[in-house]
Amino acid sequence: MNKSAKKILAALLSTTMAFSLASCSGPGGSGKKTVGIAMPTKSLERWNRDGEYLKDLFEKAGYKVELKYSDNKTDQQNNDIQNMIADKVDLLLIAAVDGSTLTQTLDDAKKAKIPVVAYDRLIMNTDAVSYYVSFDNYTVGKLQGEFVRDKLELESAAGPFNIEFTAGDPADNNATYFFNGAYEALQSYIDAGKLVIKSGKKTFEQVATEKWKTETALANMQNTLASYYSDGTVLDVALCSNDSTALGVAQAIGSDYKGSNKPIVTGQDGDVANLRNIVDGVQTMTVYKNVRDQAGVTVEVSKAILDGKTPGSDLIGSLPAEAVYDTDSYNNGVKNVPSYLLVPYVITADNLQKLVDTTLYKWDDAHKYLESTAETT
Ligand code: GAL
């Protein structure tokens, strides 16, 4: 064979190889499997972190990633997921904007044989969801309630103390777990009159905050303060389900509150602005959920599914973070969704270093406030 014939043969061979790789799997023909990730919104800090960590860890594990944020809009999220189904992704990972609006779209995913993992928030009314990876949501609320109990020494103190609740988005299945966990931890003191809800707003529906919006939580707390605390009545506790709502509530307390004390303000997520408030004494605690661990656990569960396995409790030992496997607690209206639940913990001004130890935060130059080490936050 002369030189030019060899060249032609080489060119032919490489084209054939490229072709067979392309037909192998995944959009773009890289031969890698693709994970489609649908996140709710960029407007709340945590989801930026989740997206970043998930993308990073899936790519390190050898997968391609399609990552979409849906601006908290259900239509957009349905479209995003439909597009990923059309792109033939190999697995869908979804943190739902509204857990009850995806049934039809996930039917299509099922028809296309694409497995679905619910991320952080359960997806309701569908048998198309195979697994759920989250934190123990009830415990998040319970930790907030127990923190208040201990801080006010409710067992021994005479009281009464005044408390107001701010809960999350009614479209988010987690939100009732958070509220119930907190409320039930305090219920006996409320029933005994040791804790008083001046506004009378004691049901989830009365204190829910659409889309977890800071501005809505701010306006609601301003109303409550104006209606029930404008005469200087002391508010002892503002129990907020998460950090975005705590931000608004703390702002309302800062500007509209006439009482002489600083109320206890709870939160969840470890958002940087809230950690600042914790240093400044404007917020008292946050329940921290390490989302890099959550992403790590999710990648392991997804890998097992993509390898054709049916992961169960056997996976627990090989997960990168502490988690329990639970097949009883999360029913989505159609079935019990097998769940991997990670463990949340309390952060206050006294143990901020614990966050630095995760390497996801660092001290600022003055060693006063925390900054995120994530790129997108
Ligand atoms: C929940 C999530 C919380 C919080 C909230 C607002 O579903 O578990 O961590 O971030 O949404 O986005």
Image: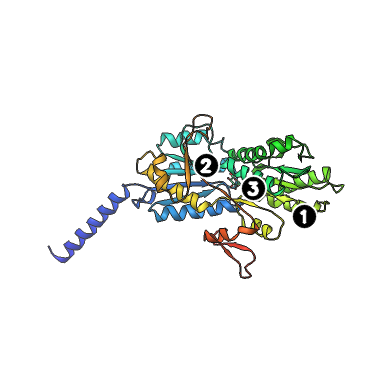
The answer to which of 128 and 268 lies nearer the viewer is 268
Residue type highlighted by circle 2: Asn
Classify residue 152 as left or right of residue 231.
left
Give the secondary structure at mark 2.
helix
Residue at the far left: name it: 1
Q: Quadrant of residue 2?
A: bottom left
Task: Bin the neighbour count of mark 3 within 10 Å (Cα to Cα): few under 14, some 14-19, many 20 and up.
Answer: many
Q: What residue does disc 3 label?
A: 242
Classify residue 162 as left or right of residue 32.
right
x and y percent of residue 6 in the render?
17, 62
Residue type highlighted by circle 1: Gly
User: Disc 3 or 2, which lies upstream in sequence?
Assistant: 2
Classify residue 329 as left or right of residue 2.
right
Q: Quadrant of residue 11?
A: bottom left
Task: Bin the neighbour count of mark 1 within 10 Å (Cα to Cα): few under 14, some 14-19, many 20 and up.
Answer: few
Q: In whole angstroms, how far apart are the C-alphas of marks 3 and 1?
A: 18 Å
User: Disc 2 or 1, which lies upstream in sequence?
Assistant: 2
Please indicate, yes or no, whether residue 119 appears anywhere in the rendered image. Answer: no
Question: What's the residue at 71%, 46% (across, down)?
Answer: 153
The answer to which of 284 and 15 lies nearer the viewer is 284
Looking at the rendered image, the quarter that the C terminus falls into is bottom right
Task: Bin the neighbour count of mark 2 within 10 Å (Cα to Cα): few under 14, some 14-19, many 20 and up.
Answer: few
x and y percent of residue 253 in the render?
77, 52
* Whether label 3 touches label 1, CB < 8 Å: no
x and y percent of residue 347 in the render?
61, 54
Tell me if the residue at label 3 has its CB under 8 Å from ligand 1: yes
Q: What residue does disc 1 label?
A: 254
- Above or below 324: residue 63: below
The answer to which of 350 and 61 lies nearer the viewer is 350
User: Disc 3 or 1, which lies upstream in sequence?
Assistant: 3
Question: What's the residue at 45%, 48% (across, down)?
Answer: 297
